[in-house]
Image (cartoon, rainbow, N blue to C red):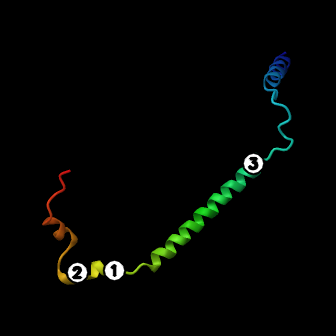
Amino acid sequence: MIIALADARLARVAEVATNNFGDTRQGSLAGPVGLVIILLLALGTYLLIRNMNARLRRLPERFPSQVDGAEAGGTQAGAEAGREPDRS
């Protein structure tokens, strides 16, 4: 009796859970296309990070304006201190 009741419930669950959207297996490309998009995004991110690291390595240790300011003993904050504030 318990087994018959369980079978009836399983039959009802199977009836409710039927696929009403047609054949979803034929021609499904969502998985492979999603994988390709994720791989392309990962490749683009890798190339951007690699390019930025190369640009950062090519930067000089100090820029000329920083070298001149350090030799003169002044700082940029000191030069801005004498300037009047902008009251617009």
Q: Are marks 2 and 1 in contact (CB under 8 Å)?
A: yes
Residue 11's place in the image compared with 70, above or below, is above
Residue of label 2: 70
> Residue 72: x, y in percent?
18, 82
Q: x and y percent of residue 86 in the render?
A: 19, 56
Residue 27 drawn above or below residue 79? above
Q: Earlier in the sequence, mark 1 or mark 3?
A: 3
Q: Nearer the viewer, residue 6 or 84?
A: 84
Q: Which residue bears the numbered disc 3?
A: 31
Q: Is residue 47 left or right of residue 85?
A: right
Residue with the mark numbered 1: 62
**In the rendered structure, which amino acid carries the disc numbered 2?**
Ala
Snapshot quadrant of residue 61:
bottom left
Kindly identify the amino acid type of the residue bearing the numbered disc 1: Arg
The span from disc 1 to disc 3 (Cα, nearest Å) is 50 Å
- Please tell me which residue lies in front, 86 or 41: 86
- Tell which circle, 2 or 3, labels the residue nearer the N-terminal end: 3
Q: Nearer the viewer, mark 1 or mark 3?
A: 1
